[in-house]
Image (cartoon, rainbow, N blue to C red):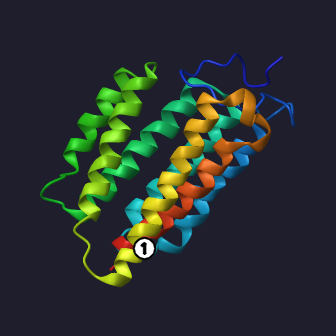
Amino acid sequence: MNYWGIKDTSVSFCEDSYNKSMYIAEYYNTLSGSFYICVALPFLNTNINHIALCSIALGIGTICLHLTQRYYGQIMDESAMLSLCYLILNQINKHKYPKKILIFILLIYIQNYRNFIVFLCIFTFNIFFIINESRNIKSSRKKFKRNLFLASMGFGTLLWFLDQLYCEYVKQYYLHAYWHFFTSIGIASGFTLLRN
């Protein structure tokens, strides 16, 4: 019996459910969600504290999703991912990406949260815009941080796809937990770029 009830998310992950604990659906994916909280803490007293708080919300949502495998955890996780991406875009260029558009994005997501492809498309577009905006970085010091951001996010995404597409071959490596780790490194390097 599942402690949190019957799994009702629209996305599945490779880690076996309730394998390590009767209270935690996906043990390693749940623990690794705390990385998003850890990388945000040093930025709480900076000009990007609203983005750091969103990363903390992402950590809580990620933990809830993998802890329970329930739809409310998925909504918390994915809406925080979309919010974090859009707040980063807003910090880069407030005129081009006004905050009020985030409400529209979240409304579209909430109406379609059971259709994972809707989330994936919105998230992919946000990442594309972040990558596109990062091309404007000129200083060599900031380029290193940008490249670390891009490399970490890219490698993490590769691991996410391997976990999704080749689960039977990579199950023992817990690649989705590594997605959390590498995207946390990417988020942290992005935070250093955005901080004044």
Please state which amino acid type lies under the numbered disc 1. Lys
Rendered view: 53 above or below 122: below
Where disc 1 sits, the SS reads helix
* Left or right: residue 183 compared with residue 149: right
At which x and y percent is residue 124? 36, 40
Residue at the image position 47 percent from the left and 72 percent from the top: 43
Q: Quadrant of residue 161?
A: top right
Q: Residues within 10 Å of mark 1 (few under 14, many from 20)?
A: some
* Left or right: residue 157 compared with residue 90: right
At which x and y percent is residue 52? 45, 63
How many callouts does the rendering have?
1
Residue under label 1: 145
> Is residue 166 in view from this perspective?
yes
Q: Looking at the rendering, in which quadrant would you find the C terminus?
A: bottom left
> Is residue 56 in view from this perspective?
no
* Left or right: residue 30 compared with residue 161: right
At which x and y percent is residue 122? 33, 35
Name the one closer to the observer, 55 or 13. Answer: 13
Name the one closer to the observer, 114 or 41. Answer: 114
Q: Quadrant of residue 48?
A: bottom left
Residue at the image position 58 percent from the left and 57 percent from the top: 182
Q: Looking at the rendering, in which quadrant would you find the N terminus?
A: top right
Residue at the image position 73 percent from the left and 42 percent from the top: 174
Q: Quadrant of residue 116?
A: top left
Rendered view: 191 above or below 120: below
